[in-house]
Image (cartoon, rainbow, N blue to C red):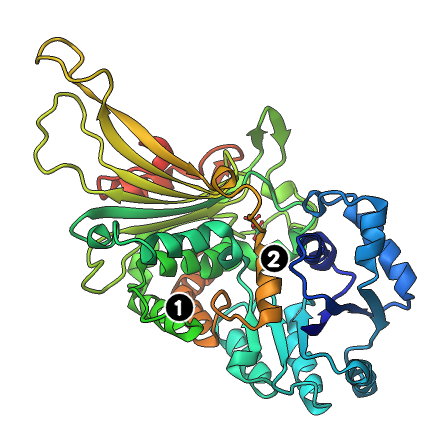
Amino acid sequence: MSFDLILFGGTGDLTWRKLMPALFQAWRHHKLPAQGRILAVARDERSDEQYREFIRERFFEVEAAKQPSPQEFDRFSELLHYRRMDLSKASDYEGLKGWVEARGAKTVVLFLATSPHLFPQICQQLGAVGLNAPHVRVVLEKPLGHDLQSARDINRAVASAFTERQALRIDHYLGKPAVQNLAALRFGNALFEPLWRRESISNIQITLAESIGVGTRGDFYDRTGALRDMIQNHALQLLTMIAMEPPPSNDADAIRDEKLKVLKSLKPFTAETVVRDVVRGQYRAGTIDGEKVAGYLEEVKVPADSACETFVALRTEVQNWRWAGVPFYLRTGKRLAARDAQIVVNFRPVPHPIFPGAARANKLVIKLQPEDGLELHLMAAKGGLGPVGSGNEQLSPVSLDLDFDKAFPTERIGAYERLLLDALAGRLNLFVRSDEQEQAWQWVEPILHHWAQDHEGPRPYQAGSWGPPAASALVARDGHAWAEEQ
Ligand code: BG6
């Protein structure tokens, strides 16, 4: 299959940190279709050779590029081309169209890795010059809007040039192997389905914890905050994958229809429930891995009086027959104790304990980060059961661990690699549809509104902790505890 992949924002961070290393890995794994060109588009004047050099230098800083040998990089870089464009100029799009048409590739993927405020303009211009034929797809990187209205505006502008099936909205969490394994676990095995419901599950926790701070992205982050950056998209997408009904097929829309239903079933927030069920926090100086780190307000490009949240914990429910009454706790934050992304499905305890000692309920842990894997926590008799009173009749928790890197050592691919290959192949399952995205915005909006008027601001928490104590209280109120406190 011949393809042209065009990266708008070709010299930006996303391109050299994530997209180029992912493309390089795909090429190295012989997964990138053979007849391809990758065209980076940006403002400055550069030759193809200069652009290749620009990427080469940066590759050695990026761990994900897995350090190519010079020969390997040279061969890969033959795919790379560069074009200067002024994104506001119609004639530059005509020029781009000429470049594409001169070759007539079967598939053209336009990846918008620019600032999202440019998306409407770029899409309209692409449509105006006819770079929107059915073999053309456009990939949109988050953040897609900062509230419902702005998301709608972007979607409307995209829809003026591209059909829904041509518009691929990225949520890179959906590309993570653990998320696909979650779908496989639920819909490729019959084992869990009878248990996957309110009768057997007591609560579900989704934690996306990072130990890093905001780094050099202070200005972007301060306009965004953890709710928009991680909850509206990544955490809610994970929630849909956990809570959705089995789709009738593996077709993209069959899956996305089910995910949308989950989003529509989420309990809407009111002014009272935002206060009760949502905790926001902001990190203060602290210590992580033995190193002293600054507080959020001391970070570069962050206003000294910022009320931006770097932590969110919330409680919600999915209001349908399967999940009625089961709390779903979502939590994310920067500068937390560990980089740890996981979904914990806590089952109900045994109805009538017959063994002495504290009975622990079973739990299934789907690990996304730092490594992906599955753990099933069970109770077992350590040294065999002895007669009552002999001291060894107590049960101990054990876990069945599935390490996917060991199980499939050569087949693991990263999120962006997967999503880029899917975009080229036109597989839409792992992309977010506009209605899902807008529904997610609609659900977080009451929180945004409340915070905008609430002068209390975020609760401080120490870097290296698990967030403000109120986050533990939120869960404890229901008689539960976060995984690390259990
Ligand atoms: C991005 C957020 O979407 O996801 C970042 O903008 C965050 O703030 C990142 O650090 C986390 O992604 P990952 O794959 O490193 O968990």
Relative to 119, is 204 on the left or the right? left
Are the residues flagged by discs 2 and 1 in contact, CB closer than 8 Å?
Answer: no
Q: Is residue 266 above or below residue 406?
A: below
The alpha-carbon separation of the residues under discs 2 and 1 comes to: 21 Å
- Image coordinates of residue 282 in percent, x first then y, are 51, 44
Foreground pick, 80 / 299: 80
Element at label 2: helix
Identify the residue at horizontal 79%, vertical 56% (top origin). Answer: 76
The circle drawn on residue 416 is 2
The circle drawn on residue 160 is none
Relative to 356, is 261 on the left or the right? right
Query: Which residue is most to the top?
Result: 390
Relative to 2, is 239 on the left or the right? left
Q: Is residue 173 above or below residue 398?
A: below
- Image coordinates of residue 33 in percent, x first then y, are 68, 66
Identify the residue at horizontal 30%, vertical 37% (top origin). Answer: 481
Foreground pick, 465 / 119: 119
Q: Nearer the viewer, mark 2 or mark 1?
A: 1
Tag 1: Cα neighbours inside 10 Å, few (<14), some, or many (≥20)?
A: few
Tag 2: Cα neighbours inside 10 Å, few (<14), some, or many (≥20)?
A: many
- The residue where tag 1 is placed is 250
**Mark 1: amino acid:** Asn
Element at label 1: loop
- Image coordinates of residue 297 in percent, x first then y, are 61, 44
Q: Is mark 2 within 8 Å of ligand 1?
A: no
- Reading the chain from its start, which is encountered first: label 2 or label 1? 1
- Image coordinates of residue 268 in percent, x first then y, are 31, 66
Q: Give the quarter of the figure containing the N terminus.
A: bottom right
Q: Is residue 374 above or below residue 322?
A: above
**Mark 2: amino acid:** Tyr
Q: Give the quarter of the figure containing the C terminus.
A: top left
Residue 101, image quadrant: bottom right
